[in-house]
Amino acid sequence: MAKKKSFHSHYKHEGGFVGLPRRVFKSEQYKNLGMTARCLLDELQHKHTGSNNGRIIFSVEMAMKNLGISYNTAKNAFKELEHRGFIERSLDANYMNGQAREWRLTYEPCYGREPTDDWVLSGIDKNSFSPSNFEKTPSKNEEVTDALKEKRAECDWAITKNQYVSGNALP
């Protein structure tokens, strides 16, 4: 009996594809993002190769060029994604040396560690975000911030414990 061919075996994605995990795409947190922030997240996902999470280099200027938007719009999109927990700054920019910021996608594994999924804990509605004042109003988000700190502390403790048990050194 002849083997049945799959539909997908006939079609090849030249150059690969970019996709978000379904759990992120179907979430209320993702749906509450602005369109610019969603497009920027797609650009960051495009830069993610599977092994460079935590070292994804993407500047505001690169976002301006790739998305065709203004400086302030790009800056606000980064702020929104960072505030909502989808991305985390892993290295700040060094303008004197011409180095752009490096980012980590919180829903993807990083350096062999499980994702922190900070975005899950940030159940912030779309209307509560304002790029100009989000740093000035932490009182509404103190519980979320405390929960994120606790989760990161647990993750760091588990990694440290695993490091001692297995004898593996972290990169």
Image (cartoon, rainbow, N blue to C red):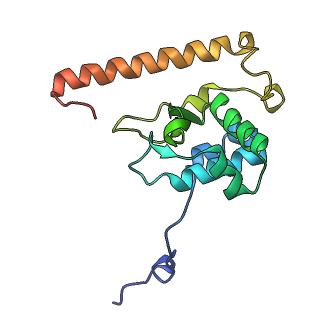
Query: Residue most toward the left?
Result: 167
The image shows residue 8, relative to residue 32, as above or below, that is below
Where does residue 127 sit, x and y in percent of width and height? Answer: 84, 29
The answer to which of 135 and 162 lies nearer the viewer is 135
The image shows residue 50, relative to residue 53, as above or below, that is below
Where does residue 166 sit, x and y in percent of width and height? Answer: 17, 28
Q: Which residue is drawn at 52% across and 32% down?
A: 92
Query: Residue most toward the bottom?
Result: 2
What is the quadrant of residue 144 in the picture?
A: top right
Where does residue 154 sit, x and y in percent of width and height? Answer: 40, 17
Q: Residue at x 76, y 38 (%)?
A: 32
**Is residue 113 shown left or right of residue 70?**
left
**Is residue 80 shown left or right of residue 44?**
right
Where does residue 134 sit, x and y in percent of width and height? Answer: 75, 22
How many labels sit on residues?
Answer: 0
- Name the image quarter holding the N terminus: bottom left
Q: Is residue 106 visible?
A: no
The answer to which of 3 and 155 lies nearer the viewer is 155
Query: Residue most toward the right?
Result: 127
- Name the image quarter holding the C terminus: top left
Q: Residue at x 51, y 80 (%)?
A: 11
Q: Can residue 86 be seen in this view?
A: yes
Q: Which residue is drawn at 69% across and 56% down?
A: 65
The answer to which of 150 and 102 lies nearer the viewer is 102
